[in-house]
Amino acid sequence: MRTLRSFVAGSWHTASSGLRPLVDPSTEEVIAQASSDGVDFAAVLESARRAGDELRRSTFAERGAVLKAVGKALRAERDELLELSRRNNGAVTPDGAFDIDGASGTMSYYAAVARQLGDRHTLVDGDGAQLWRDESFWSQHQWAPRHGVAVAINAFNFPAWGFAEKAACALLAGVPVVTKPATATALVAERTFEIVLEAATAAGLPDGALQLICGGTGDLLDRLGPQDVFAFTGSAATAARLRDRDNLRAHNTRINIEADSLNAAVLAPDVAPGAVSWDLFVKDVVREMRQKTGQKCTAVRRILVPTQRLDDAADALAAALDEIVVGRPGAESVTMGPLATADQLADTVEGTAALREVAELVHGSGERVDGVGVDAGTGFFFGPTLLRAANARAAAVVHEREVFAPVATLLPYGGEAVEAAEIVALGGGTLVTSVYGDDTDWLTGFVGAVGHATGRVYVGSESAAKAAPGSGIAMPQSLHGGPGRAGGGEELGGVRGVQRYMQRTAVQGHRSLVDTVTGAGVAEGD
């Protein structure tokens, strides 16, 4: 039996107690085990803090060279990671690639950002401001790396990409990283980390600047201080419990949370069957339901359609969902794998039953199904499931209960942009809201009305159809995060993601001195 290891304080640690099994979700075979028993978390943070002293002495460009080497190494080991993803995540090849390529792509993107930032140690923030009748008293904001550790707890659905999007930003900021993957899919995370560590060390990353915890976090969070950053991706319920820890509140430790959300796709009233935007709407919604077996924080959970188009939308989506073949990744014709764990399957069955109290089934059974390529009764399989509610505002559970699976609910609305935005907002805050239409006046009204309730708006239109990648992909150039239920945090977004691990300070004095000490007026890369 393979036991996953932690990498702490400069060496690999293998636990001998408290071990939890990892399974192949298609066959339910136990394929590995993991535990962090025996890890000294005080030593973990001490090692990281020492590394931080050295890491901050390097420039953005030097840290970017490390990220460039990491991105290249991940691409070189892509096939191995895809195979691990099939076994441990139950991911078909395109879904595994979505995770693995997202990791390498994010590292490479931030390497390019680093080249633009150049041989600096701090960042200038915006324009300066005159505080007196002349420039003898001036103010300029700058960003400097925090003198702490970034502790990142990642979700089970993206063991590679989830790690990379936090680590790339923190390391580029000059902050060492302690990463803890979800145990259920840590087989992929451990190997990803091993590849990253080898490449980063060879490129000059200081010892202790990157550490891995496979298993529980013990008293790690209770040891964080005011300069540390705690970044979490997972369920809203778990996020609430973690946010309320006494130590984090006492030290006002910076917390960045990305939680599950009830993302919505909205069809504008100008879009009719047969239109390019209609086809894009159907294609995107089905992709967002199927990809990663619906186990994505950005997956579509609510589908808003004008009342007069509801029957057409239900028929088109059901027909497309009917083409999905559920089974063991790698088996012939299979296009969607199983859910990741037995707990995920049980929660999905229970959650779908709750949705059926206010909505009727359009496609799917609402129960576990047998998968192609495995024995009957084996695996955590659940087919794509579409429901339909008669009244969007009255279907409260649809706006409250996220079923983290290939499950979504059709909701009718009258066609007004403000009404659609109000229904989206009933979800309490989303990571992404997608809207499909070509009427710029209607779209302008909707985007303006929905902005307070979502972290990102994806506009699908005829003009964007050729390039549109779908609403579910978190591009490193754009912010990933959202208000309320979605966690209130922000990741990625170019340099904005790096700033989550830095401190903004107002520097005041005579303008010439302020400009000199902050580097204001010096072009990036100089």
Image (cartoon, grey):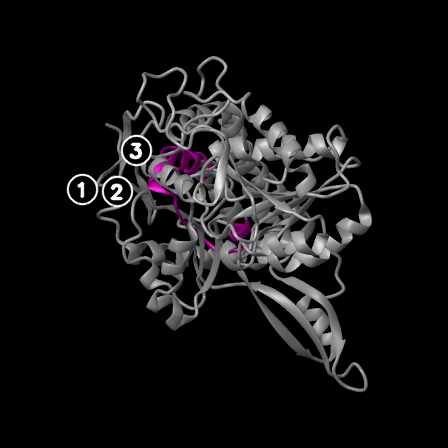
Is 401 on the left-hand or right-hand side of 59?
A: left
Front residue of 383 and 89: 383
- Residue that badge 2 annotates: 35
Q: Quadrant of residue 322?
A: top right
Residue in view at x 26 percent, y 49 percent: 39
Q: Cα distance, mark 3 to mark 2?
A: 11 Å
Where disc 1 sits, the SS reads loop
Q: Amino acid at mark 2?
A: Ser
Q: Amino acid at mark 3?
A: Leu
Q: How many other residues sit within 10 Å of disc 2, few (<14), some (14-19) or many (≥20)? A: many
User: What's drawn in magenta, residue-wise?
Assistant: 169-196
Where disc 3 sits, the SS reads strand
Is 4 on the left-hand or right-hand side of 351?
A: left
Q: Quadrant of the C terminus?
A: bottom right
Marks 3 and 2: which is nearer the front? 3
Is 160 on the left-hand or right-hand side of 109?
A: left
- Residue that badge 3 annotates: 22
